[in-house]
Amino acid sequence: TIGGTAYGRGRVITNGGYNTNVARGFGSSATQSTLTVGGTAFGHGRSITNGGDNRNIAAGAFSSADQQVVTLGGTAGRHGLNVTSGGHNRNAALGFGSSASQQVFTGAQ
């Protein structure tokens, strides 16, 4: 999900997807990378970036789940307001010998 940049009288709103990634079964692997950008507004400001509702699950013995999430947003300008929230990240590897890794970055300026 990418959005952003508004000049003049500003206002930018970017929300993000409702991401889900599931793999089931012995030795299964689920990998997910999500990105929500948004940001920048001038004039009368505003800039709201929220991020997706990320989920990543690998279920089964010896399965693995990997997830990378970025939510950026930022900058508002005169009469400002800048809200950057980030996704509702969940990451799970369910089953004997399973592993899960997750990298999350939420930023703003």
Image: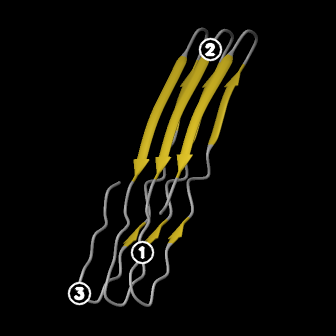
Give left or right: position of 53 versus 7.
Answer: right
Relative to 59, residue 21 above or below: below
Q: Position of residue 59 (x, y in %)?
A: 65, 22
Relative depth, front residue between 50 and 6: 6
Q: Position of residue 27 (x, y in %)?
A: 58, 9
Relative depth, front residue between 8 and 38: 8
Which mark, by number, is residue 8?
3
How far apart are the alpha carbons under marks 3 and 2?
A: 51 Å
User: Which residue shows up at 51% across the image and 55% down it?
Assistant: 107
Disc on the earlier residue, 2 or 1: 1
Q: Position of residue 24 (x, y in %)?
A: 58, 21
Q: Which residue is mark 2?
A: 63
Which class describes the residues within 10 Å of circle 3: few (<14), some (14-19), or many (20+)? few
Per the image, label 3 sits on a secondary structure element best described as: loop
Q: Which residue is mark 1?
A: 47
Question: Where, quadrant-wise, is the N terminus in this rendering?
Answer: bottom left
How far apart are the alpha carbons under marks 1 and 3?
A: 13 Å
Give left or right: position of 99 versus 19.
Answer: right
User: Which residue shows up at 31% across the image and 67% down it?
Assistant: 4
